[in-house]
Amino acid sequence: MSSELLKLDHVSLAYDTAEGLVPVVQDLSLCLEKGSIGCLLGASGCGKTTVLRAIAGFEPLRSGLISLGDTVLSAVGSQVEPEHRHVGMMFQDYALFPHLSVEKNVAFGLRRWNKEKRRRRVQELLALTGLESSGQRYPHELSGGQQQRVALARALAPEPELLLLDEPFSNLDVDTRERLAFEVRDILKKTGHTAILVTHNQAEAFAIADRIGVMQQGRIAQWDTPYGLHSKPASDFVADFIKREALMAQRAQAYLRGEAS
């Protein structure tokens, strides 16, 4: 029996503008197995965030299908509403409620659960994310890394079938970003969640993902394991992209160590 959970089948997306229809994503297909972490990796404007928004239900399809298990989430003229997709989302800016404590932020999506079940779930997630002693604190009292963990706990709280992460580490410094990418991977593997993130940062992608799609102008140039991308790039574009990003990461690390001006 197939363990495939998320499937995008020949998906195309476009924006309506005053000048007419502008294609953003063209004929994009991918499959992600249950319990795997996928990543869409590419430069700004390549269409990766638009794909994530389509999976979440915020963008209608121009063609193709998006399915989660046996359920078709999106097709032309047919769309399951975002709140009924069993999909969680962690935003780039975390979107925490400043007037709510950490516990209440995590519990926000559990309002229909009974009080005791809600309390147990919140405590379970605070322990999982290392925030046991921070439940009564407020977002402004936390570091960026702690806020990111709160956002992750809140997204996981309703037990979604799929978790979407939109540039989740981009507001953090380089060292914290890579360390937290490994931490998030460990948490998702412990819980068995299936997830897909978008990023422009190769180090993040390689730290967290089982499968990576390198995007080029609204298409996936290669959907492969991190090892496969390095050892057998499917095109000159993929090879150049991987080498260029790796060189930029090395220069950033050297700058932080004071080895470069």
Image (tube, rainbow, N blue to C red):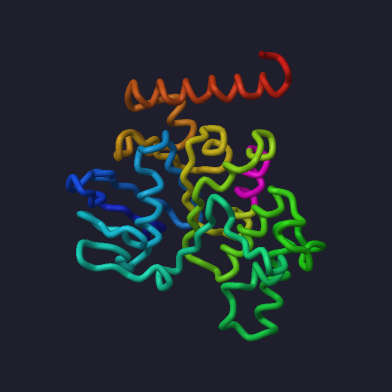
Q: For residue 54, what is the image quadrant?
A: bottom left
Answer left or right for 89 relative to 133: left
* Residue in the foreground of this view, choosing between 19 and 63: 19
Residue at the image position 56 percent from the left and 48 percent from the top: 168
**Coordinates of residue 90 in the picture (x, y in percent):** 54, 56
Query: In this figure, what is the number of numbered marks?
Result: 0
Is 182 within the magenta? yes
* Magenta stretch: helix, strand or loop mostly: helix
Residue at the image position 42 percent from the left and 34 percent from the top: 43
Answer left or right for 191 relative to 44: right
The residue positioned farthest toward the bottom in the image shown: 114
The quadrant the C terminus occupies is top right
The residue positioned farthest toward the front in the image shown: 18
Asked if residue 89 is positioned above or below residue 31 in the image, the reply reads below
The quadrant the N terminus occupies is bottom left
* Residue in the foreground of this view, choosing between 200 and 233: 200
Residue at the image position 66 percent from the left and 37 percent from the top: 173
Answer left or right for 97 relative to 226: right
**Coordinates of residue 105 in the picture (x, y in percent):** 65, 68
Answer left or right for 2 relative to 179: left
Residue at the image position 33 percent from the left and 33 percent from the top: 216
Asked if residue 105 is positioned above or below residue 253 in the image, the reply reads below
**Coordinates of residue 125 in the picture (x, y in percent):** 68, 65
The residue positioned farthest toward the left in the image shown: 20
Residue extent of the magenta highlight = 178-186
Is 4 within the magenta? no
Q: For residue 61, what is the image quadrant?
A: bottom left
**Coordinates of residue 20 in the picture (x, y in percent):** 17, 47
